[in-house]
Every structure is written in C-alpha cells, then in structure tokens.
Image (cartoon, helix red, strand yellow):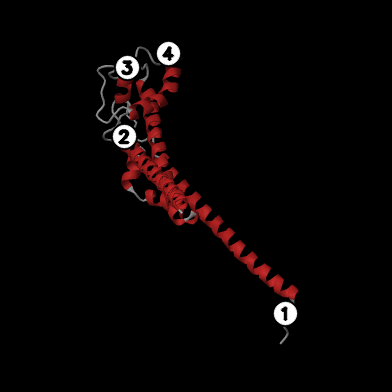
Amino acid sequence: MRTPGPAERTTTVTAGKGDRSGGRARGRTSAGRAGGLAWLALGLLLIVPIWWGTDASFPWESDNIAPGSVLKGLAVHFGPGWYSTYGPLPYYLTAAAYAPLLAVLKLTGELGRPSSVYPFGFAHPDAAIAALVILARLVTLLFGLGTVWLAARRVVQEEGSAAAWLAPLFFLGSIQFAFYTRVSNVDVHALFWLWLAVELVERTASWRACAHGVGSAFSTAEGR
C-alpha cells in the first residue's frame, strides 16, 4: 500500500479545512436567510393590517391614545390641567410623530383652530384623523420591533448568531403581541422601556463586576 507523500498530505489537510470553512459559511448564510425571512414575515404581519378600523370618531382598539387623547393634549399644549393615566411619554412621542403632518394640514388650511373635541379643528376629519391614527400605530410598531430586536440581541449573546431568527419567530406566534403592536396602545411602549431598562441594569452590573474583579486583582498583586 502506497504511503501518501508530503504534498498529498498537505493537499488533504487543506481540503479538509476548506470543507469545514465552507460548511461554516453555508451555515451562516442559511441562518442569515432564515433570520431575514422571519423578520420579513413579522413585519408583514404587523404592518399589512395597520390601517384597519381607523374610524374618525373612535378607532376600534381598546385603551388607545389616538387620535383623541393626543389631540386633546396638543390642544392645550400638554399644559396645566392636562393629565394622563399612563404617563406622558407615549403622548409626547406620538405628538412628535404628528407634528409634520399637522404642520402640513395647518399650511393647507385643513386644520383651523385646534380643539379638544371632535372634529378637533379639521376641515375634513375623516381623512386627517385616519392618517393620524396610522401614524400613532406606526410609532407603536417601531417600539414593538425594538423589543424584538432587543430579544434577538439577547439570543445572539446566549446562543450565537445562528439562532437569531428564533426571536422574530417567537413574537410572530404571539397573538397579544401581534394585536397590541399594531394599535396605539401604550403597553408596547412600556414593554420596550422595561426590557431596555433590564438590559442596561444587567450591563451596568456586569461592568461593576468586571471593575471589582480588576480591582481585586490589583489589590492581590500589591499585597504580594
């Protein structure tokens, strides 16, 4: 039986390394494709029906803040006498999203004197309020996708990038998440800020632990 020469052994080893590298590359490509498809499916599920039920007087979702609650706050400039059961931040952020459209409506004469009651000063309230409701829902949608991104980031930290597609797939199967992320409910805002706060607390704790470890190491070295 012929013994392989040095050149043949080198070729075999190189080929084996190439196969392994190619396998890892194909695995990363497959994981990236799966992640892209999961994010695409989640985005389509959330954004396709986002205009449903944009009734001018009162949309169909429960505990919504659009359009009336935010417009009432804007009418009094969120000043004295205005209050919110859920805290002001979701109203401020939604009002900021409203600002460009309201400016256009004001310049075109579609918005007269702002009012805290329907039709809120709009010349054609059906179209204007429907657009504002969709804007408010898009703000909530961004917070929902931000929550999914935080979850995907945690999965990558714990399990590696190959498992990143699990986070959007998990949220894709949540009826509650799919419902509340496409309406102007404040619960998705709260979920995002709560998740972000936990991430920051954990990161701060890990930084402190690292600093404590470095300090202990220096103390030990000086003690010697």
68 relative to 151 in the view: left or right: left
**Which quadrant would residue 102 be assigned to in this image?**
top left
Disc on res. 186: 2
Disc 3 on helix, strand or loop? Answer: helix
Instruction: State the CA–CA distance, disc 2 to disc 1.
Output: 70 Å
Residue farthest to the bottom?
A: 1
Q: Residue at x 38, y 48 (%)?
A: 171
Query: Of residues 155 and 131, which is closer to you in this image?
Result: 155
Task: Return the x and y of residue 52 as percentages of the image width and height.
Answer: 36, 36
Label 1 or label 4, whichever lies nearer to me, is 1
Disc on the earlier residue, 3 or 2: 3
Disc on the earlier residue, 1 or 4: 1
Query: Which part of the image, by quadrant, shows the N terminus?
Result: bottom right
Disc on the earlier residue, 2 or 1: 1
Disc on the earlier residue, 3 or 4: 3
According to the picture, the residue beneath numbered tag 3 turns out to be 75
Query: Of residues 65 and 153, which is closer to you in this image?
Result: 153
Disc 4 on helix, strand or loop? Answer: loop
